[in-house]
Image (tube, rainbow, N blue to C red):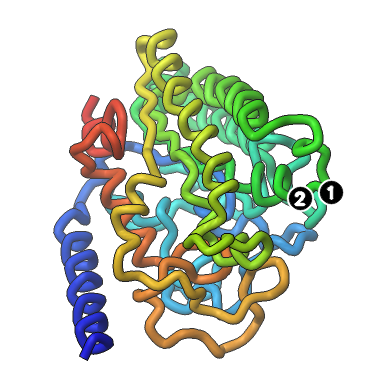
Amino acid sequence: MAKCQRNLFLSVYISVVLTDFQMFVVFGKPQVPCYFIFGDSLVDSGNNNKLVTTFKSDYLPYGIDFPQGVTGRFTNGRTIADIIGELLGFDEYIPPYATVTDQHISQGVNYASGGSGIREETGSHMGGRISLDKQLFNHYSIVSRIFHLQRNITFTREYLGQCLYIVNIGSNDYINNYLKPTFYTTSHMYTTYQYAKILVRQYSRQLKSLYNLGGRKIVVFGLGLIGCAPAEISIFGTEGGPCVESINGAVRHFNNKLKPIVDDLNAHNPDAKFTFINVTGISSQQGMGLTNVPSCILRSDGQCTQTKLISPVRSISMYYDGYHPTEVVNIHIAKMSYIAVSPMDASPYNISSLIRL
């Protein structure tokens, strides 16, 4: 009886999430002229496909629920960035930098790269990846191409200032840096508090660089509870708790320092509108009723093995592999980022308010 009640709860919950999402999808002309995406595997759409790296998802079962199939997205379906694009009214997904053409750059580019981080060395033990600094350099080249195509400096600056920019990065600076003392020295050099401080300081400079490249409406995503990821639980154990609390404590240091940085960037750049998305708070709201068991069979590094043996009901799981959320979780985070009414979830603006400024 209890199992039946649980299954009924899950079915109702999933139906509500999907119905709510469909209510907020915007059709017609996009609400912003262009949309640029920076980050790691949480929003990568194929930039890693041609890199020499183990950070790849260009194989099944990744993309099993995505309309275009396998593309290099690290989930079963759409990413947070994809869903935000739909909410903005774009009728096509923003193309990855690796394949974008001049025909499409004026609508936006996805620079995100699996395994990348705020720090340059992050993820290097696994092979190629495009760090945030390199993503910003790639954006510089795209902005230069847009200026060349439009041939009107004033118009292009105003155009870029109306676009939406999202940045979702930092998880790998813990997962594939600080928490891997065999490969990296950061955990030997810094406490979790000190590491968060220097990490956020570097991130602040990078966000200011994005502003200097013309970005004015910039969405900064905080980190989720990495200590609840199945792969981290497998490595570190939980000592009887639901998650690895020491890792979640490190994440809290980062998030607690990142929010004031966003406020400071707004205070010192009055023509810019930065906003902070509290992913930890938003995803915690959804955790009730969803299992923490991955949908696919995991490799030793936490990614899916190349197999067709996966859970037939992905929408009851928080995680698709050992680290990445399922599409149903991405829908919830994207929707709440777009319409959040509480400053605990989005501050000082949700995305729908930000794009109207």
Instruction: Say which residue appears at 65% left-offset and 82% top-offset.
Output: 306
Up/down of 40 relative to 58, above or below: above
**Are there few (<14), some (14-19), or many (20+) residues within 10 Å of tag 1?**
some
* Whole-percent x, y for residue 130 in the image: 69, 45
Q: Which residue is mark 1?
A: 183
Furthest residue toward front: 240
Q: Viewed as shown, does residue 166 lie left or right of 74?
A: left
Up/down of 321 relative to 206, above or below: below
* Whole-percent x, y for residue 5 in the image: 20, 83
Splitting the image into 4 quarters, where does residue 206 fall?
top right
| Along the line of sight, the residue nearer the viewer: 213 or 300 | 300
* Whole-percent x, y for residue 10 in the image: 25, 76
**Residue 101 visible in this rendered orientation of the protein:** no
Instruction: Say which residue appears at 66% left-offset and 30% top-offset.
Output: 195
* Image mark for residue 6: none
Up/down of 221 relative to 230, above or below: above
| Along the line of sight, the residue nearer the viewer: 297 or 144 | 297
| Along the line of sight, the residue nearer the viewer: 295 or 85 | 295
Are the two marked residues, 1 and 2, in contact with CB atoms closer than 8 angstroms? yes
Q: Viewed as shown, does residue 147 lie left or right of 3?
A: right
**Residue 134 visible in this rendered orientation of the protein:** yes
Amino acid type for the residue under numbered disc 2? Lys
Secondary element under disc 2, as helix, strand or loop, is: loop
* Whole-percent x, y for residue 164 in the image: 38, 35
Amino acid type for the residue under numbered disc 1? Phe
Splitting the image into 4 quarters, where does residue 86 fall?
bottom left
Q: Viewed as shown, does residue 123 lie left or right of 64?
A: right
Instruction: Say which residue appears at 43% left-offset and 21% top-offset.
Output: 260
Q: Give the distance between the C-alpha atoms of the residues marked 1 and 2, in whole angstroms.
A: 6 Å
Give the quarter of the figure containing the N terminus: bottom left
Instruction: Say which residue appears at 65% left-offset and 79% top-offset.
Output: 305
Q: Which residue is mark 2?
A: 180
